[in-house]
Image (tube, helix red, strand yellow):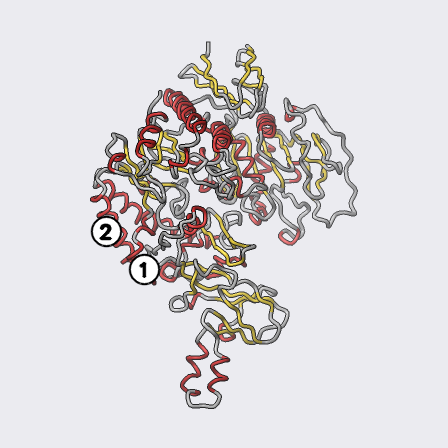
Amino acid sequence: MDHGGFTLPGEAGHEALTLRLAERWGADVIRDSDGTQLSPEILHAGHGIYSTICLIREDRAWAAEHSRLLQQNVLMSFPRVAEGEELVIELLEGFSTDQFVVNDWDGTEFWQVFDRTTGTEVLREQWSIGGEAAVETSADTADSADAADAADAATAPGTVRLTGAVPGHSYTVNFLAMRLWEEISMYNHVTNDWGDRPRLMAVEPRHPEVAEHLLAWLEEWCVTHPDTTVVRFTSLFYNFAWFWGSDPDLPHVYADWGSYDFTVNPIALREFNAGREVPITAEDFVNAGRYTSTHNPPSAIYLEWMAFVGAFVRDLGRRCVDVVHRHGKKAYVFYDDSWIGLEPWSPQFGEMGFDGLIKAVFSGYEARLNAGVDVPVHELRLHPYLFPVNLEGAPTFAPGGDPTADAQSYWTVLRRALLRERIDRIGLGGYLSLVEPFEDFQAYIAGVADEHRLIRSLHEAGAPEVAPVRVAVLTAWGALRSWTCSGHLHESPDLSLLHVIESLAGLPFDVRWLSLAEVATDGVPDVDVLVNAGPAGTAWSGGPAWADPALTTAVTAFVASGGGLIGVQEPAALDRAEAPGRLHRLQLAPVLGVDQDAGDRRVLSRRRFEVHQHHPVLDGVPHALEHVAAVRGTHLVRAGVDVLAVDGAGLPVATATAFGDGRAVFLADHRHGPASARLLENALWWAAGRERSGWTSSAPEVDVAHFPTAGQVLVASSASSVVTTVLRAPSGAERTLVLAPGELLALPVT
């Protein structure tokens, strides 16, 4: 098991290093990366060859010649407060003019002006787009003494002039903008100082001439790259949204990994609205400056737009894959970057015919996202990426960096998930030459490659044992966004559900995703425990979906009949304005036994309670909740609720209770870590009404996976120090183990 399943980034000019590390790391594939090329010596060394392409930005010369065929999106201008009845708004003020230019030549019928103080749209006759006034008055004023005054009164290009404004009110404009610089190209220029390289542009494949050009370009590319065995699409047509700013204190105005903002353009809007009684508008995307963030509960029309985009992406994506297959090559797709419309957990994903899915990973849940997709090959691109600095600007392969420590921290976290689901391949990306001075990094990656091959071999022999508890995570998105909350964990470090799914990624449970809408319509399917977590009003907790009594009734009936419920942070929360006449803020308060006071119930007395420090949920991790703060005004709503822990103010941060024949657990927050993951595991067993079974470890830092077909147990430490643990078999037999930092052991089952 010292060879295969590893993809190495090669680099022309560093052939000896490339081939030496290919041998040392057991690489069977060599790939190029952004900014690198492979020389004939590397191409003909006997390895498989991945070639990375991003179709929408590959042919810069053609894009420059067809600049009005670039991709677009809707922006909302920064709000301006009116001082008088006239207001001029500079549309791109605050946005990067390197990235955006106002599109005032096509699609202006979709523009909107809003009074954001009242939340109402301003009538079209009250505002004009830059240049309109000058065009309207030029014939009458050309020979007039008032010509200069008329020119001054005209709206300048890139602006909107509003009349009849209400002083003191805030106004914004929803307008179409064209993107002059593709976002990942921008990032690479900034991160890697690519000042001498051309700025790439993204073309819009909705235009038929663009789609045909992309297919013709791909056909020619396949002919001229005979050594390529796998075409690595990065990704397809639409990037996740990333608005760059002009203010050095706000360099990024908005970013969201699951947003469809960059799919919006006049040709698509017109096609979507054709024949519709209620058209989609710019405001459906702008959403009062919230845009189409994945953290927002999706509107019905936005879900229709996503399906509309998905159908287009699948159709053109299938044609691209067919080109690749005709040339005897395989087609893999990289999930990050321009993945919008792919939706790998969509039931229709397989229609495109990809041979493999590649995912860049920092955390375990990202590995589970990849592993669960129905595609022949699942591959992970590990971190650290071989760049001088990481995504947050901290040094990696640069003075002050420690790439080996980074690699170990990522791998030991990620490996928990690999114990549960099979990943076929792992690899790295970036500039291989950067690793040459780091012998310890080279040695560590060799060990990582070997560990992965070991884990993969056990999966290939047969699946690991799964606990007899079926868990369903309940969100507004449901299965479409399984194993993700948009983006990486370090980008949303305060989002409780992201931490919950990271803990779940390494636990031995069968996990699925359900949408709030399907539960309201069809009830709870055949699962044992529901999990609902996140801040109030978000897609994760659910927001307005909980105003539907059918949803609350379905979950309440499920628990009453013997099911389990775990609520984290603000589960099933509706604020008073969203639910007039409702008794509770948490719509499942009767089930959970707790509610949260938003400030309108301070006059009411609070039920007294005692803290139960000895409870199955706290087994082995009695101090896991020491630093958790309570959600505002958390209080008990009935008797029979065990308070497991309180914060410094004496408010409950964890409770457990029976409800009918079922059980419910409330946690004020969840932050992934060994102790909190063990507490969540305990809570799932208890809520399901089951006694823990299977192989277990006494130390929360040590994960255990039993592969019955292979007759092996894998024991993996995620700790950065030596750990002593007691390994317990289902028979009751115990064995004391001492594991080095990050150690993985394979033990035969006797």
Q: Residue at x 64, y 31 (%)?
A: 660
Q: Residue at x 72, y 39 (%)?
A: 635
Q: Which mark is residue 688?
A: none
Q: Is residue 129 above or below residue 692?
A: below
Q: Quadrant of residue 132?
A: bottom left
Q: Residue at x 37, y 58 (%)?
A: 268
- Residue closest to the eye, 712 or 391: 391
Write down the residue under mark 1: 64
Q: For residue 275, say whether it is visible.
A: no
Q: Position of residue 567 (x, y in %)?
A: 61, 37
In 3D space, how far apart are the residues under numbered discs 1 and 2 (Cα atoms)? 18 Å
Write down the residue under mark 2: 216
Q: Quadrant of residue 172?
A: bottom right
Q: Position of residue 519 (x, y in %)?
A: 51, 41
Task: Rate crowding at label 2 as few (under 14), some (14 to 19) or many (20 or more) other CA atoms within 10 Å.
Answer: few
Q: SS class of the residue under badge 1?
A: helix
- Residue closest to the eye, 307 or 375: 375
- Residue closest to the eye, 410 or 276: 410
Q: Quadrant of the N terminus?
A: top left
Q: For residue 601, say whether it is visible.
A: yes
Q: SS class of the residue under badge 2?
A: helix
Which of discs 1 and 2 lies nearer the camera? The answer is 1
N-terminal label among 1 and 2: 1
Q: Position of residue 661 (x, y in %)?
A: 62, 29
Task: Rate crowding at label 1 as few (under 14), some (14 to 19) or many (20 or more) other CA atoms within 10 Å.
Answer: some
Type of amino acid at the residue the image marks with label 2 = Ala
- Residue closest to the eye, 479 or 535: 535
**In this rendering, position of residue 107 left or right of residue 738:** left
Q: Residue at x 57, y 19 (%)?
A: 723
Type of amino acid at the residue the image marks with label 1 = Ala
**In this rendering, position of residue 383 left or right of residue 316:** right
